[in-house]
Every structure is written in C-alpha cells, then in structure tokens.
Amino acid sequence: DAGVIQSPRHEVTEMGQEVTLRCKPISGHDYLFWYRQTMMRGLELLIYFNNNVPIDDSGMPEDRFSAKMPNASFSTLKIQPSEPRDSAVYFCASGGRWTGDADTQYFGPGTRLTVL
Amino acid sequence: GDSVTQMEGPVTLSEEAFLTINCTYTATGYPSLFWYVQYPGEGLQLLLKATKADDKGSNKGFEATYRKETTSFHLEKGSVQVSDSAVYFCALSDTGGSYIPTFGRGTSLIVHP
C-alpha cells in the first residue's frame, strides 16, 4: 500500500482565500483523523471520522474550518476564509480496527500551509 | 482525562551516547502505549508499542517498557546515531474507551557526530 496520501504538500495563499486540503487514507482503514501541528500548540486533533461519519469535531478551532469524508477513500479539510494564524502543518492519519493493530495511527506526510 | 507528559527538549547528544527520553501517563483505563518518531519534513510514524503492563516494545535499537506501577514508558537506546535526530512523541490509546490517542508534546533529539 502507498500509505496515507495528502495533497498538496505545500500551500501558500493569501488571507481571506479558501484552502482545501486532501487526504486519501490507507485502503481498508475505517478511521480517519485530521491533525494540526504548530510550534506553539504542538499536535492538535481537529476531527475524526469512523466509517466516513464525523464522530468528534470538538477540536475544530472555529466555523471557518470544515471537514468532509464523502467516501472511504477520500477526505477534505477546508478553511474559508483563511487567516495567517491558520499557518501550520496539517496531517491526515488513518487507522483500522479490523487490522489487529487497531490503536496504531498511520500518518501522511502533511500539508504545510502558509497564509500570508 | 487521559494525559501524557514527556521531558522537554531538545536533547542533545554525541553519537554513540546513551539515550533516555522520559514519558509518564495518566489514564483511567488500561491503555496501550506508543512511541512515534517524526523525521524532518515527514509525518509521525510508529516506532514501538506495548499493550499491557511489563511488555517491552522494541524497534531499531530503541526500547521502552510499560511500567504500570510508575505509569511510565521511558524510551531508551544504547548508542544513538546522527540519523536518530528527530522528534519523538509518547502516546497512549485507551483500548477500553474511545480509541482516540493522546499524544505528548514531543521531544526533539539532536545527535552530533
């Protein structure tokens, strides 16, 4: 398997623009997580899905952030409008209860977002 | 709630030195414990794990033992290499609860030749 795939790897945008981050989890995994990593706050869980259904979005910082998972192989994280304080590395991770290794998270390479 | 505390970095060592990174946890259930490693420019990847008390996880020369009596899971390596320079995250997952992991803040390791 290719692992978790994220795109784009780098995104530079201007304040006020819409940003869409994309994630393809490992095939067969039924959990998908979105994280944000900054120097100040470390690694923060934003939202997670189970079987494509959002289970807990309490980590989403505000209404400007939204996430969807229309099918088992694709998820998006959208920021609209973007602000400079959203600059961070955003990670997608997946995990599978059926694998016998249910608690392990498999991370993608991340998207480095810079909002000017 | 569950929490993980790990020593602050950076930890700076010379090549072939002994490494310890301390990690303690608080959990209401019987968690699985993990160490993840993040190399520069990459995502986190599992280094090792232990699922019950007294289990020892090991990989790539790194070891950690699940100590329930001291609620600890310290990471050790007998002889570090420059290529071990990375950020190390201790984490737990409550197997009887939500499955959602709790991560520590991460400890940066810098190994000099």
Image: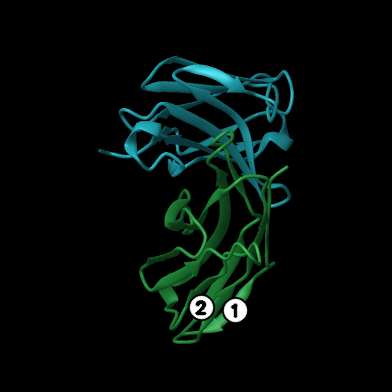
Chain colours: A cyan, B green
Q: Nearer the viewer, residue A60 or A11?
A: A60
Q: How many marks?
A: 2
| Local crowd size for mark 2, using a 10 Å CA cut-off: few (<14), some (14–19), many (≥20) | some
User: How far across and down, in percent of the image, does residue A64 sit?
Assistant: 70, 20
In the picture, the disc for residue B12 is: 1
Q: Name the residue located 49 percent from the left edge and 86 percent from the top edge.
A: B17
In the picture, the disc for residue B48 is: none
Residue receiving disc 2: B111
User: How far across and down, in percent of the image, does residue B41 sit?
Assistant: 48, 53
Q: Quadrant of the N terminus of chain A?
A: top left
User: How far across and down, in percent of the image, does residue A25 sit?
Assistant: 38, 30
Q: Are marks 1 and 2 in contact (CB under 8 Å)?
A: yes
Q: Quadrant of the C terminus of chain A?
A: top right
Q: Secondary structure at mark 2?
A: strand
Question: In 3D space, how far apart are the residues under numbered discs 1 and 2 (Cα atoms)?
Answer: 6 Å
The reply, left or right, for residue B50 in relation to residue A72 is right
Q: Where A28 falls versus B75 (above or below)?
A: above
